Image (cartoon, helix red, strand yellow):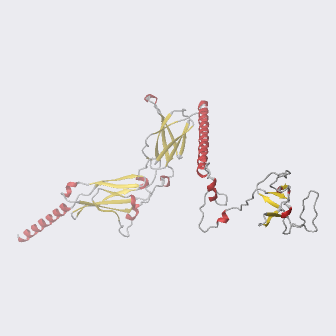
């Protein structure tokens, strides 16, 4: 009995240990999904929060190239993508995965030191990554046609997706925008070019366009872009051409007129400012410098006043000489060489002598006085003669010889 009892207790102990081990294991994440667009990748999953029993849960995500799992020599080395994160997703864009490679991802849950099993997910970007629509679409009218400018879908590094899908092309939908819904009819066009022209359209009509990207190798296609509308054009009518010409002509004329008006008033203002019409008075003009400038200059204390003035010569009115015959009692005896003329007058031969000549100067008399021939009892009967100085030589000089006798001599 003792042997059987011991064996029974050992079985119960092993059964209890297995029960505790199973109860300690957490449920694994499920529904692993790759959310992709061109080269942007995000791995997401679901997990039952009731298993955590109000404890915080963390998740760990690792990845490895699939070909390394097939190696039998050594166990693969998993790379860390997201470690102990509370989010139920992991961004894989920053891993720079090779677009044509195949990778294995695994996710594990951790609650208070208890771990779940790893859940695997295979991912190939070239096959599984979704293709995005064109990054930009533009329209431009070309007469009655429309030019469509298409920008390629972009990767996470802003490069073209044609680097990974060389056979990428576009599916174009276009239709005439009309109020009448029954007249709505969609037309399609496919092209791999980035500039596409829609021809055979109606002139002066509004059209709308929507485009999607396509890749046939893995049957990929993106969503359509939002509709973009533009009105076509046509031949310009003659009246519109004439109107444009007249408007441009009037604009040029007004511009030239305004330019001339501004130039005239500007010139007039500058001239009145720098060259005023009001000049300095004559008694202030000596302040101007000798260089001809109209700007007055101040006299310095040490300046020489003679340098600032011109030489001035003052000439008096030419004097008129009057020649009188003095009475005989006042005349000395004539020299032996002097002869008396028929009129009773004596001429002086030596003009440089000191004798009396009876010649004196009268200033300011312009007329020649005739000699007085009348007899006066108070005066001597001496005839007077007058001679204008203008008739004499210009080098004539007068000199006072005998001031005490009141006789002026004339020297030539």
Left or right of residue 333: residue 249? left
Looking at the picture, tell me which residue is in the foreground, 85 or 243. Answer: 243
Picture coordinates of residue 7 (x, y %)?
A: 10, 69
Picture coordinates of residue 374 (x, y %)?
A: 85, 50
For residue 298, what is the image quadrant? bottom right
Looking at the picture, tell me which residue is in the foreground, 173 or 61. Answer: 173
Left or right of residue 246: residue 335? right
Examine the rendering and report whether any part of residue 294 can be seen.
no
Q: Quadrant of the C terminus?
A: bottom right
Looking at the picture, tell me which residue is in the foreground, 32 or 341. Answer: 341
Q: Residue furthest bottom?
A: 3
Q: Is residue 39 above or below residue 209?
A: below
Examine the rendering and report whether any part of residue 160 can be seen.
yes
For residue 49, what is the image quadrant? bottom left
Left or right of residue 351: residue 126? left
Q: Quadrant of the N terminus?
A: bottom left
Picture coordinates of residue 258 (x, y %)?
A: 59, 41
Left or right of residue 304: residue 19? left
Picture coordinates of residue 183 (x, y %)?
A: 46, 29
Q: Is residue 70 above or below residue 245?
A: below
């Amino acid at each position: 009995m003792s042997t059987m009892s011991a064996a029974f207790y050992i079985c119960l102990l092993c059964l209890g240990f297995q029960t505790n081990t199973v109860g300690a294991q957490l449920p694994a994440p499920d529904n692993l999904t790759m959310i992709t667009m061109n080269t942007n990748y995000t791995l997401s999953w679901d997990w039952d929060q009731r298993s955590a029993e109000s404890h915080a849960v963390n998740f760990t995500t690792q990845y490895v190239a699939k070909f390394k799992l097939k190696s039998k020599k050594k166990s693969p080395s998993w790379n860390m993508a997201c470690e102990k994160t509370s989010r139920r997703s992991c961004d894989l864009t920053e891993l720079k995965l090779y677009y044509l490679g195949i990778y294995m991802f695994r996710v594990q849950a951790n609650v208070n030191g208890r771990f779940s099993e790893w859940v695997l997910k295979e991912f190939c970007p070239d096959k599984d990554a979704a293709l995005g629509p064109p990054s930009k679409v533009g329209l431009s009218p070309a007469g009655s046609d429309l030019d469509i400018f298409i920008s390629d879908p972009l990767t996470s590094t802003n490069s073209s997706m044609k680097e990974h899908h060389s056979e990428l092309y576009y599916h174009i939908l276009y239709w005439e925008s009309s109020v009448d819904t029954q007249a709505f009819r969609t037309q399609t066009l496919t092209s791999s070019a980035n500039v596409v022209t829609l021809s055979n359209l109606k002139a002066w009509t509004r059209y709308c366009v929507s485009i999607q990207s396509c890749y046939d190798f893995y049957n990929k296609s993106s969503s359509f872009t939002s509709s973009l509308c533009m009105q076509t054009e046509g031949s310009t009518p003659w009246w519109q051409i004439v109107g444009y010409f007249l408007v441009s002509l009037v604009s040029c004329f007004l511009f030239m007129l305004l330019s001339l008006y501004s130039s005239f008033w500007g010139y007039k203002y500058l001239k009145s400012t720098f060259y005023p019409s009001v000049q300095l008075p004559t008694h202030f003009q000596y302040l101007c410098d000798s260089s001809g400038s109209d700007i007055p200059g101040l006299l310095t204390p040490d300046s020489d006043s003679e340098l600032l003035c011109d030489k001035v010569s003052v000439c008096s009115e030419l004097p008129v000489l009057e020649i009188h015959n003095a009475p005989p009692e006042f005349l000395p005896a004539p020299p032996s060489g002097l002869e008396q003329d028929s009129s009773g007058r004596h001429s002086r031969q030596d003009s440089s002598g000191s004798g009396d000549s009876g010649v004196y100067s009268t200033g300011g008399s312009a007329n020649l006085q005739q000699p007085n021939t009348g007899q006066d009892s108070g005066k001597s009967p001496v005839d007077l003669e007058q001679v204008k100085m203008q008739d004499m030589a210009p080098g004539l000089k007068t000199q006072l010889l005998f001031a005490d006798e009141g006789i002026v001599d004339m020297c030539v």
